Image (cartoon, grey):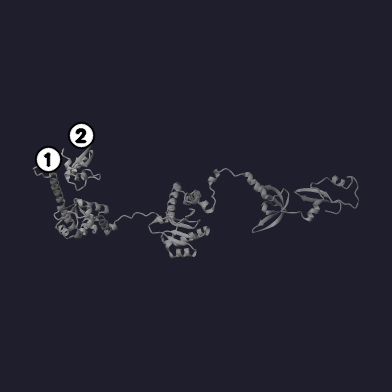
Amino acid sequence: MVFGRKFRLQTDHAPLLRIFGSKKGIPVYTANRLQRWALTLLMYDFTIEYVATEKFGHVDVLSRLINQHVRLDEDYVIASISLEDDVRLVAFDSFRFEVQQSTENDPVLSKVVQYIHQGWPSKQTVASNPELQQFYNRRESLTTVQGCALFGERLVIPSRLRKRCLDQLHTGHPGIGRMKAIARSYVYWPAIDAEVEKAVKACTQCALAAKTSPRVAPVPWPKPQRAWERVHVDYAGPLDGDCFLLVVDSFTKWPEIVQTSHITTTATIKILRSLFARMGMPELLVSDIGTQFTSAMFGKFCSMNGIEHTTTAPFHPQSNGQAERFVDTFKRGIKKIREGEGPIQEALDLFLLKYRSTPNPAVVGGVSPSEAMFGRRIRTNLELLRPPTDRQQAEQEEDQQKPRSFNKKDPVYVKVYNRNSWSWVPGTIVEQIGGVMYNVRTEKRRLVRSHVNQLRKRLPSAESFEETSGLPSNPLPLDVLLSAWNSPSTSVLPSSATFSPCVSSIDDSVHITTTIIGSC
């Protein structure tokens, strides 16, 4: 009985140091009784050390008293018999007479069996044979039963029968891991793991039903250096019976979406031709292997416009990830915008406006696609949240320009349009409306509203200058006119002077003037 958990165990049997003192666990080939002892000792914290028999008399005192008695090492004999029985049960179920004959005829295993019985030579002797050297490294675990070699409880298979053994182990087509586990429980030969892997990989049925190989690390597209250098195209839909051609610039992430009811080569070329007329021809066009992109007509269209066309692998959308990812973004965005079943064109316009004006972290500098493409932000209704601009600066700029202006009653020429022609017509400014608009009355008493760019200054003619140069701006009474001639209002005028009233219509009023000499 042992009191306490920590103690020191002394023994004069050196092999027990490897059985009970090993830090790697209990060897699988250890006898059952020794395994039970080792499991019992696992509950204790102990150290084991070897003591020579000559110095171990206090324990071995009783046996030393019988000096004349021939003692047998019962522990060794019982353990050997128990091991032999255990191994025989496995051996008889695992091998046949053919295995025994093949072992005798095998040049390597025949030497192994001989060395197990007669003792192993030095390491230098077996170094020339790599297979024999592997058995030498495991010599302490090798035994023989009825002419067959055993590695622990596993039967060592001769080289002639290894192919048949692999076929038997592969019954049911287990994978590499499961087949190795089965083999390690029953058979052994050098490099058995490598041959199991080779056998499974060479099996046609296993190869046809195998899983997809692990994906390699994705290789990104080369980074473009400028806008519209490489564009990715793909079709999305159908949505409400129509498809959508999506074009995305890889540098600025600027999207273009065109709704179409046909996805033929002709329709695709028509859409791209219109788009390239606005944005220019790209250097590289990336698409999938759709028939509209792989046709001879589309190839001719690209070659005539100097566009390099690249197609991706079939059923591998990751190769065209720029377009495929935007297809998913487009579908989700349209679905959320059209929650109330609104018009799809309205939802498409709103989606493009928001996407183009939203900063994108994938764009250089984290700016929006519109800034990367055009160098400016496109204006949205969110600009109303910004404070107004400086009005004084705007007024100063307007003052510097000094646009033409006219005053009321200024004589001008005004453009009067008649069908597809126009002509200059004399007129007079009636009033100013706003900053650059004027109401003008022509000679034909027609009121015309004109822009300042449709007016030009008019100088009075010579006849009108002579008629109006000597007259005051307002009509005067008759006695004032007579006083200008130093004549009283009741004086008698010379007989040669005659008076003739002349009626002049000016500004819708009638004024009576007197002509001294001549007639009106």
Residue 438's place in the image compared with 270, above or below, is: above
Q: Earlier in the sequence, mark 1 or mark 2?
A: 2
- From the viewer's perspective, tell me whether residue 228 is left or right of residue 312: right
Reading the image, the residue beneath label 2 is 3
Q: Position of residue 162 (x, y in %)?
A: 21, 58
For residue 64, the mark is 1
Q: Is residue 262 visible?
A: no
The type of residue carrying mark 1 is Arg
Q: Write down the quadrant of residue 57 in the picture.
A: top left
Q: Is residue 310 visible?
A: yes
Dot 2 lies on which element? loop
Dot 1 lies on which element? helix
- From the viewer's perspective, tell me whether residue 142 is left or right of residue 218: left
Residue 143's place in the image compared with 38, above or below, is: below
Residue 59's place in the image compared with 179, above or below, is: above
In front of the other: 187 or 233: 187
In front of the other: 280 or 461: 280
Q: Position of residue 210 (x, y in %)?
A: 30, 56
The type of residue carrying mark 2 is Phe
Furthest toward the top, the residue is: 3
Q: Position of residue 106 (x, y in %)?
A: 18, 60
- From the viewer's perspective, tell me whether residue 303 is left or right of residue 175: right
